[in-house]
Image (cartoon, rainbow, N blue to C red):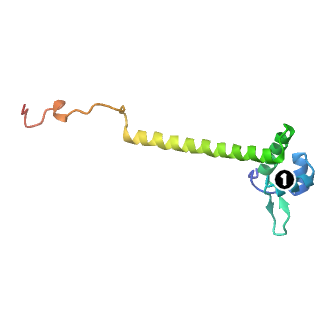
């Protein structure tokens, strides 16, 4: 059975090993606001698969020469781009839905003509 990616199951030593860093590095990342592990009732840190992926992304960015503040900003901007992409998709779906309701089988700007020019009235033509 697969665990949800956001379920916090790893203790700090396991998370550090999976991310390829020292446990103290995880504490520093937390102090700097780069990660936010869940805490148990006993105040023990627990990390999820999403947290591990985030730690690996921090490592990738710092290996490319960014400092921790730069890595944090890049990750914030990535999250904002993701949020905006989802918002654009939602708006596009709403627009497509409204078009489908407003114009089933019709073109925009179709010409409107009086009905009696197409179908004669039942009482005969009065022209």
- Looking at the image, residue 76 sits to the left or right of residue 25; the answer is left
Question: SS class of the residue under badge 1?
Answer: helix
Is 85 placed above or below 33 here? above
Q: Badge 1: few (under 14), some or many (20 or more) residues near its Cα, within 10 Å?
A: some
Q: Residue at x 84, y 37 (%)?
A: 64
Residue drawn at x 87%, y 52% as measured from the top left: 15
Q: Position of residue 21 (x, y in %)?
A: 91, 48
Specify the quadrant of the image occupied by residue 67: top right
Is 43 placed left or right of 85 in the picture?
right
What is the x, y in percent for residue 123? 7, 37
- Residue at 84% of width from left, 67% of height from top? 43
Q: Which residue is mark 1?
A: 29
Q: Nearer the viewer, residue 6 or 61?
A: 61
Of residues 74 and 103, the one drawn nearer to the viewer in this rendering: 74
| Residue 9 position within the rendered picture, expressed as x and y whole percent measured from the top left | 82, 57
Q: Residue furthest bottom?
A: 41
């Amino acid at each position: 059975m697969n665990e949800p990616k956001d379920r916090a199951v790893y203790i700090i030593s396991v998370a550090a090993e999976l991310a390829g860093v020292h446990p103290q590095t995880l504490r520093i990342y937390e102090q700097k606001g780069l990660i936010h592990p869940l805490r148990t009732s006993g105040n023990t840190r627990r990390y999820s698969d999403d947290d591990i992926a985030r730690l690996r992304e921090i490592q990738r960015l710092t290996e490319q020469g960014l400092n921790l503040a730069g890595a944090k900003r890049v990750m914030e901007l990535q999250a904002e781009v993701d949020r905006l992409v989802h918002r654009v998709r939602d708006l596009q779906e709403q627009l497509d839905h409204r078009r489908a309701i407003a114009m089933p089988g019709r073109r925009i700007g179709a010409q409107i003509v009086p009905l009696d020019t197409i179908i004669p009235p039942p009482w005969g033509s009065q022209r």
